[in-house]
Amino acid sequence: MHPAEEQVVSFIKEHKLIPPGSKLLVGFSGGPDSLFLLHFLIKFERLLNIRISAAHVNHNLRGRESLRDEIFCSDFCKQNEIPVSVSSVDVKSYAQKNKLSVEQAARILRYQFFNSVCREQDLDLVVTAHTRNDNAETVLLNLIKGTGITGLGGIPVKRENIIRPLLCLEKSTIIEYLKKQNLKFRLDKSNLLDDYQRNFVRNRIIPEIIKINPNFSGNVLNMSFLLRNFNSELDVFIEQTIKEFTRQDVHSLMIKTSLFQKRGEYIAGMVIRRSIDGAFGKQLSYLHSKKIFSLLEKQTGSMLQLPGALSAIREREFIQIALITKNDFSAADILIGKKISLDNRTFYSRMVSKGKALISPEDNTVEFIDSEKIVGNSFVIRRWLPGDSFHPIGMKGRKKVSDFLTNAKVPADKKKHALVLLNNNKIVWLVGFRLDDRFKITNNTKKFIKISIR
């Protein structure tokens, strides 16, 4: 067995990539890496106890050369009695339509085809020919663009049904092997151009790094494995922390402020971003999580807007994350004796006799007021505004609505939606909380108005 073959067999066993009896679909471009992969699997088909099929995607990016790649792959599979599925796609059109780079579009279309073939032919695993060099390029690109630990973990050896048994090999080892075996392969000359970011990294940056460290790709691969193992352990811890410090209901996510004292900024940031992604399907950046941290230094009720139509509100013991809902309700006129629906609730006011003016201390949705203290025959109902003030029953003098709600420990999300009922520009009722003393009924009241909200 050739040393390169021994290395791959050992790598497959070490990472338990191919269970005996597996049915494999090999992504076959005709290039040196995928040719080595398919040749290797054919050679060790019995040893690994596998069945092999191949799939080739013609990206139509290089005119006749793309067609020649397709013919080469079909002929090779026919000669080796390997079933092959071929797809021809328009990568450029797909990229333009979906506002993607050509590289991203090609990758999406490629894996869509691989997955469809697996479903149609009942295959178990997709095998791709990524090498150590590909992993080093990916890590370096992620580092240049800005990444966390996950990005530095590089290309995974296995993800879902995709395996990459050649990550243990250098491309130079593969080329040397193919030449000794007299195996011809296709070369994509566009890889020699610096038009794409990956090509620039491959052709310009990595050769300079190799002058300093010839084993650069091997070192990067070892680092990737270490970081992926670390990430696995970290994921378990993050999930436990999410359960401990967050609470979710239908409309919002509550994050305990104690998270920020008991866990460091990095862990707290990961908890915030992952729990928001889980609750709302919105992915925030590290900088956004830092903005959420800043709410801890602000007073209760402080709010900031986040991407994805999300808001973060500072509560006493929580930071609440919620979707910002569009609400066109600002103010409405209400005639006495008429009902009006707003904010999924119904407001009603009507004249009642003294005998029906019974106030229940437990019901904050109903109040009775002195009709003779009302100007005209209507009210205005709206959301409270900064600067609004009234004379709450049971308190001396005037008090700001904002201070009243804060002292009553009303959660910030309910506080911002609180309503006030006005007559002649005076607050009659902080709806659901407290009546204004100037409109209360007394022993001298002769005409009563019942106001309610349900």
Image (cartoon, grey):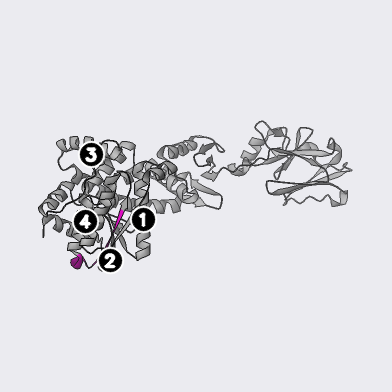
Mark 4 to mark 1 CA distance (whole Å): 19 Å
The amino acid at mark 3 is Leu
Using the image, determine if residue 41 lies above or below residue 366: below
Extent of the magenta region: 45-56
Give x and y (percent) for residue 432.
70, 45
The amino acid at mark 4 is Leu
Give x and y (percent) for residue 186.
21, 49
**Label located before the other in sequence (4 or 2):** 2
User: Which quarter of the picture shows residue 190?
Assistant: top left
Circle nearer the viewer, 2 or 3: 3
The amino acid at mark 2 is Ser
Which residue bears the numbered disc 2? Answer: 22
**Element class at badge 4:** helix
**Element class at badge 2:** loop
Q: Within 10 Å of the Cα at label 4, are there few (<14), some (14-19), or many (20+) other Cα atoms?
A: many
Taking depth in this image into account, of 169 and 212 the one nearest to the observer is 169
The amino acid at mark 1 is Phe
Mark 1 to mark 2 CA distance (whole Å): 19 Å
Which residue bears the numbered disc 3? Answer: 192
Circle nearer the viewer, 4 or 2: 4
**Element class at badge 1:** helix
